[in-house]
Amino acid sequence: MSVHTLIQRSEKPSHLNRLSHAKSPYLLQHAENPVDWYEWGPEAFEKARQEDKPIFLSVGYSACHWCHVLAHESFEDKVTANLMNEHYINIKVDREERPDVDRLYMTFLQASSGGGGWPMSIWLTPELHPFFAGPSLPVPQTYFPPGRFRQVLYKLADIWESDPDRCRASGKQIIESLRDATNVKSGTDELPVVSLALTVYARLAKRFDTRYGGFSSAPKFPQPSQTTQFLARYAALRMHSKDSGAGEQKNADEVLKHLDAESLGEDGKDSKLSEPSSKPKSKQEEAEHARDMAAETLVQIYKGGIHDVVEGGFARYSVDERWHVPHFEKMLYDQAQLLTSALELASLLPHSSDGPPLSSTRTTLLALARSILIYLPRHLTSPEGGFYSAEDADSLPAADSTKTKEGAFYTWTANQFSRILGEDAEVAVWAYGVKEDGNCDPMHDIQGELKGQNVLFMAHTPEEAAEKFGRPVEEVRCALQHSLDKLRAFRDENRPRPHLDDKILTCWNGLMISGLARATETFEGEEAVQALTLAERSAAFLRAQLYNEASGELTRSWREGAGPKGQADDYAFLIQGLLDLYEACGKEEYVIWAIRLQEKQDELFFDAEGCGYFASAPDEHILIRMKDAQDGAEPSAVSVTLSNLLRLSHFAEDRHKEYDEKAKSILASNAQLLGAAPYALAAMVSAAMCREKGYKQIILTESPASFPSPYLKAIRERFVPNRVLIHLDPANPPRKLAKVNGTLRSLLTDINTDRSGNADARSAQPNVRVCQNFTCGLPIRDMAELKAALK
C-alpha cells in the first residue's frame, strides 16, 4: 500500500511525517500519524544524542491487528503524539524487514516481563540500550491501552529528566546481561539424538488435544516446524525401521514411561487415528502415532474456521481451542509451511485404495494443500512472480465504511448467508455451521466485533449433509461448491479486500518455494506444472531483484526497490528452497546457486571463534549479534542451516568435510539448550535425526524427455527426509555440479558420447544408483529392487 493510497483513505489528511518515504507497508500505515516518526537508522540515533533524549522504539508489522489498535488509539491522537514528540525520539520498525532489531529487543522484553508480542514498545537510551519495556500481557493484549500508555510516557520522561544516568546505567547493565546470556559455552556434537527425539515426541504426545487436534490450549498456532513437520520426520525415519537394540530400547523406555494413557491426551484417549488407545510399544507404533497426531491436527485445521473455506488459505492462528475463531490475518509463511507439512504427511499415509479411515485423512491433507495452491496465485503472487507477505486481519465492512473491523471480509450474518445463497442456503447453513445469532463464542470476541457474525467452518461433511437431506452425495458436493462460488463473488463485488502487505521477503519466498517443490513431486499433470511454475517464477524474481551476482549477497526485501540487507534466515530458507526445487525439477542452476549462497552465508554469519551461526547480519547499530536457535512461527535459521549443510555435503560431496565440520559446530554450540529443552529446537532435532540415520544419495540417470519416469515416481512415493536426489541427464550432464561431486565425475566418464557430445542409447538408459556413506550400489533398473533399496 503506497502512502498515496493511505492519503486517499483518509478524509482529512493532516500532514505526512518522514515515514511517507519508507518502502515498508507497515511504516507507510503510520505516515499520517502526528507522531514525528523516524526509521531505524543513523539519523534518528544522532538526533537522540544531540538532544539527549530517550528513544521510543515501536515494533510491529502491517497485518498485525493489535498494532492497528494501538496506532488508532494512541499514535493518531494529537495529545499523545505531542507528548511523544516533546520527550522522545520516536522510531518505528517493521519486524519483518528488521528481524535483527526485533530479536534483540524482544529478548529483553521476554527476559524482563516473561512475555512478548506485537506491537512491541521499548524505551532506549540514545546509546540504544533498553531500560524499559512493556507490556507483559498475553495475546491479544500485547499493547498499551491509551490511558496506560500516556501514564508510562509521562513517568519515563520524568525519570529521564531527573536521573538520566540511572537509566543509562540500567540500560548498559541490561545489554551486558543479555550479552552474557548469549555467550553460551559450546558442548559436544556427540549428542544422544534418539533420546532427544523421543523427548520431543513424548512432550507432543502428552500435550496432544485428542478432541480438536493441536498441542496447546487457546490460542492455537499451527507452528509446523515445532509440531507437524517434526512429527512427520520422526515418523518417516522410524517407520519400517528395525526395532532398537537393548541399549537404545532402555533409553527409549526411560523417555516413553511418561506416555501412559493419561499423557496421550486431555481425556486419556489416544489420537483418533491410532488404534488401540495404549502407549506405543515399538518403533513402528511410535511412528504411526506421531504421524497420526500430526495428520489429525492438520485435518482439524482444515475443517476449522482458521481455514477460509470460501477461497482458500489459512489464518495465522485461532483464538479458541477448536480452530474456529481465527485471528484473520493470512501470512505467507503459514501457507508455505502448512503446504509442506500436509504433503509430507500425505505421502506417509495409505492411498484411497487401502480404504478408510487413513485414506480419507490423506484426501483431506491433499485438499488442504490444494486450498493453498488456489489462494496463493490469486492473492499473494506479484505479476513478476515474487510472493507477497500477508493480508491483513482488518478491513472495511463495505465500500462506504470509514472504520475497519477485524474479520469484516470473512464473516457472515445468517440473513446475509440466506439472501445470497437462496435455495442452496439450507444445506450450506448446516454444512458450514451457520447460526441465526452467530456462531462465535463471546468469550473469544474481546472487542465485540463478531457479535451476530458467523465464521464458516466444516461443521458437517458432504456425506453427512447428503444423508440428512436425502440427496445424492455428488449433488450435495456440487451445491456446496456453487454456494462457495456465490459467496466469493459477493465478497469480491461488495467488500473491500483486506490490506495487502505487498512487501516481498526473501526468507518467506524460500519457504514457499520448498512447499511448491513438494507439491510438484506430489501432484500430477496440471497441478504439478502450476506448482513448479510458481516456484520457478519466485526463484527468478529473487535472483533478478534480491540477489547481487557480483557479491553473492542477498537483500531481505523488495517493495518499489530493494530493502535492507539479508539476514541469516534469508540465506537459510532460500538455500533450502533451491535444493528442494532442484530435486523437484532437476535443473542444475538451482543447486549451484544454493552452493554459492551457502558460501556467502558462511562468510557473513559463521562464528569461527565461538562456533555456530549468528542470526543477524553484521551491523554496528545492533549491539549484540544473537544466535537464536529456538523455533517460533518459522523454524530457526540455524536449524535449517544444519539441514542444508548435511544435504549439501552430499550434493557437493567434495566439500563434505567442510560442511560436516560446520554442522558439528551448530550442534556443539546448541548442545546445552538441546539437552535442557530439545522441544524448543524441534527443527534442529529433526535435522540431527537425519544425520544420525545417514543420508541416502540417490542418483537418477534419465533424460527429461521421459520425465517423470516410473523411477522418479517410485523415489517420490514416500516422504524420505534423509533423501538427496541428484539428476543425471546423459544428454545434458550436470558438469558444474560434477566439479564438486566426485561420484558424478566418475559417472560422467562412463557415459559414452559421440563427436557432437550426445550420449549413446546404451548410456542414456534410465537407472538409479542408491549410495550411502559415499558408497554407491550397482545401477538399479528393476522397480521392486528400487523400492526395497529406498526403504
Image (cartoon, helix red, strand yellow):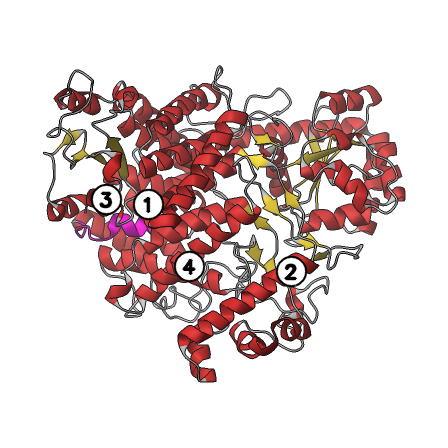
The location of residue 86, given as percent across then percent down, is 88, 33
Residue 190 visible to an observer of this rendering: yes
Q: Quadrant of residue 10?
A: top right
Residue contact between numbered discs 3 and 1, judged by CB atoms under 8 Å: no
Q: Is residue 186 left or right of residue 437?
A: left
Q: Position of residue 754 (x, y in %)?
A: 15, 19
Task: Tell me where residue 189 sits by quadrant.
Answer: top left
Q: Which residue is mark 1?
A: 521
Q: CA distance from mark 3 to mark 1?
A: 10 Å
Q: Of tags 2 and 3, which is closer to the observer?
A: 2
Looking at the image, is 407 positioned above or below residue 727? Answer: below
Instruction: Report the residue marked by disc 4.
Output: 367
Residue appearing at x 56%, y 55% in the figure: 317
Q: CA distance from mark 2 to mark 3?
A: 43 Å
Question: Which x, y percent locates residue 668?
Answer: 37, 30
The type of residue carrying mark 4 is Ala
In the rendered image, residue 714 lying in the magenta stretch gets the answer no
Whether residue 183 is visible to the viewer of this picture, yes or no, is no
Q: Residues within 10 Å of mark 3 (few under 14, many from 20)?
A: many
Assign a secondary structure to mark 4. Answer: helix
Q: Which residues are magenta?
A: 230-244
Determine the main secondary structure of the stretch shown in magenta. helix
In the picture, measured across the screen, residue 746 lies left or right of residue 49, that is left
The earlier-in-sequence mark between 4 and 1 is: 4
**Which kind of residue does numbered mark 2 sit on?**
Arg
Crowding at dot 4, Cα within 10 Å, few <14 / some 14-19 / many 20+, comes out as some
The label nearer to you, 4 versus 2, is 2
Q: Nearer the viewer, residue 531 or 236?
A: 531
The CA distance from mark 4 to mark 2 is: 22 Å
Q: Earlier in the sequence, mark 3 or mark 1?
A: 1
**Residue named by callout 3:** 715
Q: Residue at x 44, y 20 (%)?
A: 600
